Image (cartoon, grey):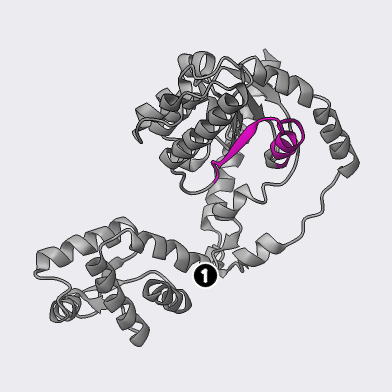
Amino acid sequence: MEDIENIEEDEYGFSRNYFLAKELGGASKRSAHKLSDIHIVDEQELRETAIEMKHAKEISELMSDYKTMYSKWVFELRCGFGLLMYGFGSKKALIEDFASASLTEYSVMVINGYLPSVNLKQVLLALAELLSELLKCKRKSSGSLSKGQETFPSRSMDDILSFLHGPQSEDKDCFICVVVHNIDGPALRDPESQQTLARLASCSHIRMVASIDHVNAPLLWDKKMVHKQFNWLWHHVPTFAPYNVEGVFFPLVLAQGSTAQTAKTAAIVLQSLTPNAQNVFKILAEYQLLHPDEDGMPTDDLYSASRERFFVSSQVTLNSHLTEFKDHELVKTKRNSDGQECLNIPLSSDALRQLLLDLNQ
């Protein structure tokens, strides 16, 4: 009984001390330092920093072990399976070495899924043209050329996929190997792209070798896609190699975006808008460069300047352009001391000058 009372007293004392410490901590003086005071390294400088690789000997031995599996991987492709490489580290160099060393008898096409955008229709067209030439050469060598099957019928996605899947050759080794670096990349993560890739992988004349890096990549596919269309054989091949190429298109958390990179990003967004919208943006940018100390350009002044140059015909048209700018975070609004609504571009003067140069090219 006495032990229980001692335990309760200890718990009460701990609780009391905890809340006393919280009160004292809340009353203490807060630091005057701000996150903006931290010096952030320029992105280009950080990317160019050489990082010393450790365990070079062990990694080299690991790569040598993978090379002994090349013949097995080729056999799996010939059996109709797709190869899916996963594991920590960039697998780009490994897959390219496998293709250059062991797939020399086959045609190989590479899709870089880590790029910001990938045009899958162009990829399918290129594959169809490549297969058409391949089948033409096969028939010439066998002396059984059929003119009706030399080319694919149309340029629609369904017809191209049907051509790639058609029974044009009895040779089971007559296939094209499609290498997809980062099949889980940002440009390929949408359901439509994955469905197209799955249909492509299921074509009789296509074999796919792909890599994934995102931990949730398997959630992109359903059971049918995994087992019936992609027909994956999973290979755990950690390389511990840095993502030097794949990471170029991702902003670094510890880096400040360079002027050129910031301007390039904004230019890509603006080029997707109409010429009149771009011209309205130029007016705003030029005003901001001429008046760097002001809160921004008053909306009424922008409307007057845009209407004088025939870039807008009404306030409604200007508002539609401004909505696009705000949606893409190219422009922000705030009120000045007179209560006027002002428009401001959240870019540095250097980035703004670079952006205008890019737009005028």
Q: Residue 217: horizontal and vertical position, in percent? A: 54, 29
For residue 274, what is the image quadrant?
A: bottom left
For residue 82, what is the image quadrant?
A: top right
Task: Specify the amino acid type for callout 1.
Answer: Ala
Measuring 45% from the left and 61% from the top, which residue is drawn there?
Answer: 265
Q: Residues within 10 Å of mark 1 (few under 14, many from 20)?
A: some
Between 14 and 326, the one lying in front of the other is 326
Q: Is residue 101 left or right of residue 330?
A: right
Q: Residue 334: horizontal and vertical position, in percent? A: 27, 69
Q: Is residue 341 left or right of residue 331?
A: left
Q: Is residue 94 above or below residue 71?
A: below
Whether residue 175 is visible: no
Helix, strand or loop at mark 1: helix
Q: Residue 26: horizontal and vertical position, in percent? A: 52, 54
Q: Residue 262: horizontal and vertical position, in percent? A: 48, 66
Whether residue 331 is visible: yes
* Residue sitting at the far bottom: 290
Please identify the quadrant where the N terminus is shown.
Answer: top right
Measuring 87% from the left and 44% from the top, which residue is drawn there?
Answer: 56
Q: Which residues are magenta?
A: 93-114
Question: Which residue carries the number 1 mark?
Answer: 260
